[in-house]
Image (cartoon, rainbow, N blue to C red):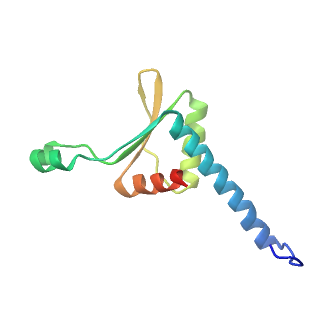
Amino acid sequence: MKEGECLNSSSESKLVDKVKVKSIRTRLKEYFKRNGCMRKPNNQRRLSEGQDYKKGYEVRIGLNNLEEVREIRSLLERKKFKPGKTYHNGNKIIQPIYGKDSVKRFRKLISC
């Protein structure tokens, strides 16, 4: 904001939205760094095995409890991701994100 400029309601809401976006990005990044991974398909296997090779693009975020599941799903939905169905893997709850475009967007989001 320049000197002498007024902060009107629209610029104020943009400022608030930037703060919200940063905190969403930060929280997603924290969850991913704590216990997350990304997978992309192996093109060699896809060529050799054809449709028998089912692996695709995926982000997996490991969570400890249902409260974290609710938070991460809310954060993802606010950033326009469509989270997959959560599942248990050992003592962790896994929140997946599927699809090439979604994985690329998530990777770009957390690398900032």
Residue occupying the far right of the picture = 4
Q: Is residue 1 above or below residue 106?
A: below
Residue at position x 52%, y 57% in the image? 80
With 21 as the anchor, is 72 left or right in this view? left
Residue occupying the far bottom of the picture = 4
Task: Indicate the position of residue 23 as horizontal and vertical percent values.
Answer: 66, 50
Residue at position x 22%, y 43% in the image? 54
Image quadrant containing the C terminus: bottom right
In front of the other: 109 or 54? 109
In front of the other: 25 or 102? 25
With 6 as the anchor, is 14 left or right in this view? left
Residue at position x 77%, y 72% in the image? 11
Task: Indicate the position of residue 52 as horizontal and vertical percent values.
Answer: 14, 42
Q: Quadrant of residue 104?
A: bottom left
Task: Indicate the position of residue 3 as horizontal and vertical percent values.
Answer: 87, 76
Q: Quadrant of residue 60?
A: top left
Count of numbered badges drawn on the protein: 0
Task: Indicate the position of residue 19 as horizontal and vertical percent values.
Answer: 71, 56
With 25 as the anchor, is 98 left or right in this view? left
Image quadrant containing the N terminus: bottom right
Q: Is residue 62 above or below residue 39?
A: above
Residue occupying the far left of the picture = 48
In front of the other: 12 or 82? 12
